[in-house]
Each structure stands twice: as C-alpha cells, then as structure tokens.
C-alpha cells in the first residue's frame, strides 16, 4: 500500500492523475467495509483509497477510475448537487467503470 505502487498502476491502466491527490487509508478497521475508495466532496481533487482497494491491481485501477469520475462530477455540478443526487451519479460512475474495464 504505497503511493508509488498506486501511481505505477494508474500509468499502466492509462489513468491520468494530474491535479488529483491520493491518500491511502491504512486503518485495518476499514477492512470491514465493502467500499474501496472515496472522492472527498469537501476537498475536490482528493481520492482516499481504503484497504480493500489493494486486493488486486485491477481493483486499485478501477477504484482510481471510478473516484476520478466523481471528482469530475463534483467539478462540473458541485459537491452538494452530486451528493443530493447520489444514486444518479453513482450509477453513471459504475457504468463508465464497467465500460472501461469490461470491454471485449
């Protein structure tokens, strides 16, 4: 769980992290969560990677891509609007992630 590992994966999968700050949450208590990451709506541009993001290289990449979409949503629509319409924006992020990573 090191930042250089995360950056290497982002490069490998073609995920541009320019202007994005990555924080790695190493709290073992967060292993109980199904969530792998979070785009911080209070600090637009921050991604927090939770311990379960590191189950595999692909999960790290998918999490980065997914959370980057949320950052773009926050920038375009504002954090409050995105949070108030969470279901819509989460669905959009998962759809884009699926299209990106499950191409034939």
Image: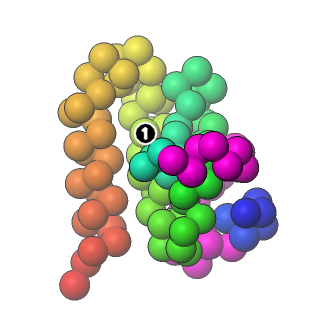
Number of numbered discs visible in the structure rendering = 1
What's the residue at 59%, 44% (across, down)?
Answer: 30
Does residue 74 sit above or below 25 in this rendering? Answer: above
- In the image, residue 19 lies in the stretch drawn in magenta: yes
Residue 49 lies left or right of residue 4; in this view the side is left
What's the residue at 70%, 45% (across, down)?
Answer: 27
Does residue 26 sit above or below 78 in this rendering? Answer: below
Does residue 99 sit above or below 34 in this rendering? Answer: below
- In the image, residue 46 lies in the stretch drawn in magenta: no
- How was this image coloured? rainbow
Indicate the quadrant containing the N terminus: top left, top right, bottom left or bottom right. bottom right
Magenta stretch bounds: 7-32
Indicate the quadrant containing the C terminus: top left, top right, bottom left or bottom right. bottom left
Residue 11 lies left or right of residue 90; in this view the side is right
Badge 1 element: helix
Which residue appears farthest toward the bottom when viewing the image?
104
Query: Which residue was labeled with disc 1?
Result: 70
Q: Is residue 20 visible?
A: no
Badge 1 density bin: few <14, some 14–19, many ≥20, Cα 10 Å:
many
Q: Is residue 45 visible?
A: yes
Q: Position of residue 17 (x, y in %)?
A: 62, 55
Q: Position of residue 14 (x, y in %)?
A: 53, 71
Answer with the quarter of the image where residue 16 lies: bottom right
Does residue 45 sit above or below 62 in this rendering? Answer: above
What's the residue at 21%, 33% (across, down)?
Answer: 88
Q: Position of residue 81 (x, y in %)?
A: 34, 17
Foreground of the two, 19 or 80: 80
What's the residue at 67%, 49% (across, down)?
Answer: 28
């Amino acid at each position: 769980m090191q930042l250089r590992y995360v950056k290497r994966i982002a490069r490998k999968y073609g995920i541009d992290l320019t202007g994005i700050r990555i924080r790695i949450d190493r709290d073992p208590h967060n292993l109980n969560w199904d969530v792998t990451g979070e785009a911080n709506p209070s600090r637009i541009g921050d991604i927090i990677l939770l311990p379960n993001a590191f189950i595999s290289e692909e999960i790290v990449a998918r999490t980065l891509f997914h959370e980057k979409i949320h950052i773009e949503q926050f920038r375009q629509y504002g954090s409050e609007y995105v949070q108030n319409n969470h279901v819509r924006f989460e669905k959009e992020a998962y759809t884009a992630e699926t299209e990106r990573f499950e191409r034939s």
